[in-house]
Amino acid sequence: MTDLGYEFLYEVTNQGIAERISEEERDAIHIETPLDDKIRREISQGNQVVLTGNPGDGKSQYVQKFKTEFNPPDYYYVVDASEYEIEELAEEWRQAVTDDKAGIVAINDGILNNLAEWAQNSGTQFDFLVDDVLGQLEGQIVHGDPDTVVFDSRFTTIDLGNRSFIAEAGGENDAPGAGAVRRVIMKLTSDIAPDTREEATNHAESNAVALQDELVIETLGRLLTRLDQTVDHMTVRDVLNFISYCITGGQKEPDEEVNINDPSYNLHYYNLAQNIDGVYLSQQLAKHFDPHLTSLPTIDIQLWDEIEEGVSYSDYNLESLKQQYICLKRAALFGDEAAPPEYSDGFIRRFLQEQQRTEFEEYIRNDVNRQVIGFVRLLNNYFVETPHDDTLRIWFDHNYEYGDPDVLVSGNTVSTSEFNVEIPELHPTIEDALGYTPPYFVFEYNHSGETIAELRVDYSLFRFLKTGGEETPASISSQSLENRVIQFMEQIYRHHTDSEDDIRIKHKQSDAITQIKISPTGHAYSLE
């Protein structure tokens, strides 16, 4: 193994990557993407690139990398804006702008907002921080026609918090996520992988070879693509950390006693990839997509028969067999040689289709008319209505702001023609630099050519409506999710007052619906 072998991978596994690692090590973990081309092009044109986002997004990594290509002091760089006082950073940055220096500034969103707030009362020489940099930060995501003027400057602000690294382009025939996963795997395994698993002398070498298999790359790509919208934000560091963990298992020393034909060996990459006690992404995969939580009856029976075969009654241990079954199913998911080959064909596709994430993705990918009709049906169905294709029934509670209501009332329906769906996109100036997966869509009510009400539908709200509130995330209350919908409908009601003669009352405890028919004179009524 080289100096970038097991010890370095162990450090990456445990996120032990210092800001000042060697150039060789930095290159070993740098994944070339379209963002590199974008930054290189902007600097070459004399512009400043402002990188903002979350810890682990790679801001400092890009600064350190490009400092070796565009050398200071001719170019201006800020590795970590948090090390500066606000006034000190503003003045140094202003001087770099005055001196017409290109470069990169790495700065967190919070510091940038504080800097812009300070600049508003500190003289016109700092206007670039408000008009250009902050203006571009606020215009990263667009829902309609973009404002291109704000990006017409010598600054290009890129919020890496919006980046879906796993969605960034691969080959033309790549499965979702496979391109990004392949680049990371090839970077991290090139120094330690022998030609075959049979030649491996320890668990890390065995895992490194196995991870290079195209079926394994495709499986990991598809799993991480699904996970991308489920977790809050998946950083480049998370992916590096995860793939390193799939190689080392977090073990300080390589294990030389590895049997690749034993699916229950806990340091196999497929057991590590879905280990609830592992690193962040392996925990999330175990939580959301572990095969033993997903029932595929035909395959499950075959796999269970496989592990029970040859086990005598006296040796029968249910817990031990369950663990063997889970490991065998994981191996089959990845098409590993430890699993019988007849179980791998089509298993990946069928397993992933079981995940209900697909429905949310389809709502985003459909044409607008199908999106509107589909979501109207979902809303109607949630409120115990027979789904309609052409109208949305409006429910409200006049007193909802003061507590959880006992009943909801409905006396209006609105045509689907008055609704629209907007899918967020990256601003066209930066869309060529980042992968992006919309984490939500916006359901709009339009009246007389004006947008009156908007409902932001993320996965949590979508899942809440789909399951009737039965599978609400622990961090979000059912009441808060339902109130988002009720408040949206309340806004519609204020601008749509054509009442019907069919009033409905929904009793929330029992879900019972009471219908009241009102005569045209408004005096007589009947209960149904």
Image (spheres, helix red, strand yellow):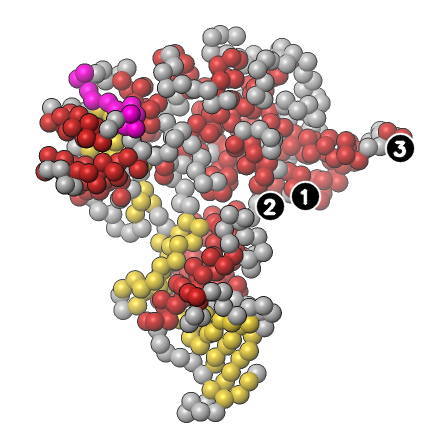
Q: Is residue 114 left or right of residue 31?
A: left
Q: Which of the two labelled residues, at mark 1 and mark 3, occupies the earlier sequence position?
A: 1
Q: Whole-percent x and y of residue 159?
A: 31, 36
> Disc 3 to disc 2, how far (Cα)?
34 Å
Are circles 3 and 2 on residues that touch, CB within 8 Å?
Answer: no
Q: For the C terminus, which image quadrant?
A: bottom right
Residue at (67, 16) in percent of width and height: 258
Residues shaded magenta:
73-83
> Disc 2 to disc 1, how far (Cα)?
9 Å
Secondary structure, mark 1, is loop
Residue 430 magenta-highlighted: no
Instruction: Give the residue number, with chain letter if any, for mark 1.
Output: 296
Q: Amino acid at mark 1?
A: Leu
For disc 1, the neighbor class at 10 Å (few under 14, some 14 to 19, many from 20) is: some
Secondary structure, mark 3, is helix
- Residue 443: which quarter of the image? bottom left
> Disc 1 to disc 3, how far (Cα)?
26 Å
